[in-house]
Image (cartoon, rainbow, N blue to C red):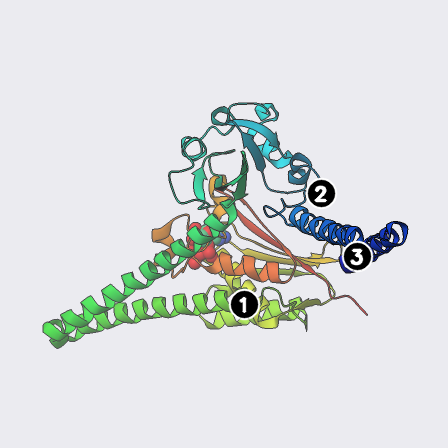
Amino acid sequence: MPFPTGIRALLALAVAGLAALASFLLNGDAQASLVVLVCGVAAVLLALGNRDAVAAPSEPAAPQRDGPPLAEAIEAIAEPVLVIAANRVRSANRAARALLGQHILGEDVRLAIRHPAAAERLLNPEEGTPGAPIHLVGLGTREQRWEMRVRDVENQRIVHLSDRTGSYAAERMRVDFVANASHELRTPLASLLGYVETLREDAGDDAPTRNRFLKIMHDEARRMQRLIEDLISLSRIEAEKYRAPDQTVDLAVLIEEVRVELASEGKRAGDIVAEIAEVPPVRGDRVQLSQLLHNVIGNAMKYGRESTPVTIRLRPGNDGMVQLSVADEGDGIPATHLPRLTERFYRVDSGRSRSIGGTGLGLAIVKHVVERHRGRLDIASTVGKGTTVTILLPMQRTA
Ligand code: ADP
């Protein structure tokens, strides 16, 4: 059983004392006994001193390594990770093998990550800020963007790749959006200022010219107003994206209301044919669904041919959905444009859209409203025949 150092010292001293006493009793020689006692005590003190010397750590202890080996540990990481030693790939997790190829194990790192900037950093780690990420474009597919970080661990180099394609695209969208919105506002504003200037100078005296200019100014101001209203709507809908709508909305009633509103705005609402079947109400946001109808029916009227009908159909769909479709008999949209129609400010024919008062935000708003309602949106079109926009919205569940 191990004794603490203090107790061991006392025991040793006691043994030394007993040895000295025994020596005195056996020999009757006090001097010899004293020598035995002194030697015993010295031995004890030496032993203690040595023990301390052995116990004193000469260097900090190396950290204890436990847990799985590196190759196994990196396998648990979802993003690509490689371990490089002597400029060769020592191990690579599943994501790295999927990105760079199964063959990379044991390969020269320059061949494994075929990217000049990556090779530069891996072969000359002392250049550049240590730990700072470098950006790689075109690794994997041409559009993909990666961030690569390198860390040295003993004689190995850990390479971590993070996919930044999504955040890059979001950032690009944000920048493009601000640039597009500014441009859309700047054009009518420049026109307004131009006419104000002309009126102030001389054209103000001539009544017909003045009235013509005022009409243009009014239209430009209205265009700016519509754009600002659409921008506000879009940001409101986006802000509420994660809050499920909670009103009970009868789409048949709403369609009729929108039809009357469009007619009162002077649009050719008489050409609307409504085929309304009996459907249960949907759980929705009334204002947003009304705006959705305005935009889709409004587009069918704007882009449909003169004196052709716009047909609105409402019927029960599959999987607990209500199906709404709006069909026109316009020029249609070429297939290449279809996937981009819901992007903000995307127009097939910018001149035409602007001349009929389009903001380029109508279908982006529709898409966001449908998403908030957990619905689905489909746009089908045949050039020369027309376009049908179909929207599926979940029926309200009865508790
Ligand atoms: P806009 O305000 O320009 O109408 P939208 O976002 O509503 O913007 O629509 C985007 C573009 O999609 C339009 O500019 C137009 O080119 C095209 N588009 C939308 N609806 C139709 C349709 N029913 N028929 C033909 N083209 C359409």
- Mark 1 residue type: Ala
Residue 384 coordinates in the image, percent (x, y): 48, 42
Circle 1 residue: 239
Q: Is residue 127 left or right of residue 368?
A: left
Q: Residue at x 67, y 51 (%)?
A: 49
Residue identified by numbered label 3: 13
Mark 1 to mark 2 CA distance (whole Å): 45 Å
Q: Residues within 10 Å of mark 2 (few under 14, many from 20)?
A: few
Residue to which mark 2 is pinned: 67
Q: Residues within 10 Å of mark 1 (few under 14, many from 20)?
A: few
Q: Quadrant of the C terminus?
A: bottom right
Quick one: which residue is furthest to the right in this view? 26
Q: Which badge, 2 or 3, comes first in the chain's sequence?
A: 3
* Quarter residue 126 falls in: top left
Q: Of helix, strand and loop, which one carries label 3?
A: helix
**SS under mark 1:** helix
Q: Quadrant of residue 361?
A: bottom left
